[in-house]
């Protein structure tokens, strides 16, 4: 399936668990990034950064620090949405236990929750673990999270000297949306540190 987007950029409302929403403007790329966990692709060079993550578990409100900060970028083309994240951390503290798909086990992870209709009702969730394993689910207030749902999408991770990095490619066929309203989508980012069982989101 190919979706032709005629707009130049997408405006994402970033949900922050009851706080005021932020916005992230993502621009169309003419250079499709290679999904290998390396963030040197031309498409990432001028992409707007999402930063300023805040802990919500176990101590709400704690800001990320220089050594464990999270930087996220996004772009898109006619086929898919793309995401790149650099997750700073002490490499010795990053949990990378391998597990089967949809099994969170004992591994650090990064999650993308996306809602093309921006209706706070029908979310699609994509998780990438430091081990390279994927998880995905659909979610709404009635059923909660349904991890029996599986989609075909690409991701890759790479361990770094000061953390780990990842890339995602989410084809539009994985998402449910109204073709008449494509300008403003809802989104959330979620990162989990297994070393201290803390979790953060973008405030």
Image (cartoon, helix red, strand yellow):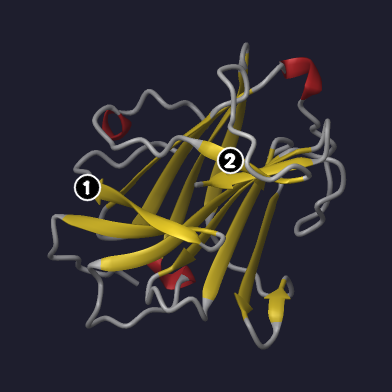
Residue 137: give x, y in percent of width and height: 65, 69
Dot 1: what SS? strand
Query: On the rendered structure, is 95 left or right of 120?
Result: right
User: How would you rate the neighbour count of disc 1 (Cα within 10 Å): few for under 14, some for 14-19, many for 20 or more?
Assistant: some
The residue lying toward the viewer, choosing from 96 and 190, is: 190
Residue ID at (43%, 45%): 83
Q: Mark 2 points at which residue?
A: 54
Query: On the rendered structure, is 54 left or right of 81?
Result: right
- Give the total of numbered labels: 2
The quadrant of the picture occupied by the N terminus is bottom left
Residue 58: give x, y in percent of width and height: 78, 44
The residue lying toward the viewer, choosing from 36 and 21, is: 21
Residue most extreme to the bottom: 142
Q: Nearer the viewer, mark 2 or mark 1?
A: 2
Residue ID at (21%, 49%): 28
The answer for how far apart the CA atoms under marks 2 and 1 are is: 25 Å
Contact between marks 2 and 1 (CB within 8 A): the answer is no
Residue ID at (32%, 83%): 178
Q: Name the residue under label 1.
A: 27
User: How would you rate the neighbour count of disc 2 (Cα within 10 Å): few for under 14, some for 14-19, many for 20 or more?
Assistant: many
Residue 75: give x, y in percent of width and height: 31, 46
Above or below for 125 versus 84: below
Above or below for 66 versus 100: above
Residue 130: give x, y in percent of width and height: 70, 35
Dot 2: what SS? strand
The residue lying toward the viewer, choosing from 1 and 6, is: 6
Pick whichever of labels 2 and 1 is earlier in the sequence.
1
Residue most extreme to the top: 161
Query: On the rendered structure, is 186 left or right of 64?
Result: left
Query: On the rendered structure, is 29 left or right of 172?
Result: left
Residue ID at (56%, 27%): 69
């Amino acid at each position: 399936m190919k979706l032709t987007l005629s707009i130049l950029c997408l405006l994402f409302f970033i949900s922050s668990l009851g706080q005021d929403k932020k916005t992230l403007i993502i621009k169309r790329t003419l250079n499709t990034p290679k999904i290998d966990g390396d963030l040197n692709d031309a498409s990432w060079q001028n992409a707007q950064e999402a930063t300023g993550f805040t802990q919500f578990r176990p101590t709400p409100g704690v800001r990320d620090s220089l050594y464990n900060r999270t930087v996220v970028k996004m772009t898109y083309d006619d086929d898919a949405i793309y995401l790149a994240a650099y997750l700073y951390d002490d490499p010795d503290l990053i949990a990378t236990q391998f597990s089967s798909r949809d099994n969170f086990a004992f591994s650090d992870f990064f999650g993308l929750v996306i809602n093309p209709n921006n209706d706070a009702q029908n979310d699609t969730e994509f998780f990438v673990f430091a081990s390279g394993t994927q998880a995905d689910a659909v979610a709404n207030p009635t059923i909660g999270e349904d991890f029996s749902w599986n989609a075909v999408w690409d991701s890759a991770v790479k361990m770094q000297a000061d953390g780990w990095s990842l890339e995602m490619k989410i084809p539009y066929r994985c998402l449910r949306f109204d073709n008449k309203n494509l300008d403003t989508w809802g989104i959330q980012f979620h990162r989990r540190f297994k070393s201290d069982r803390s979790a953060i989101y973008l405030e």
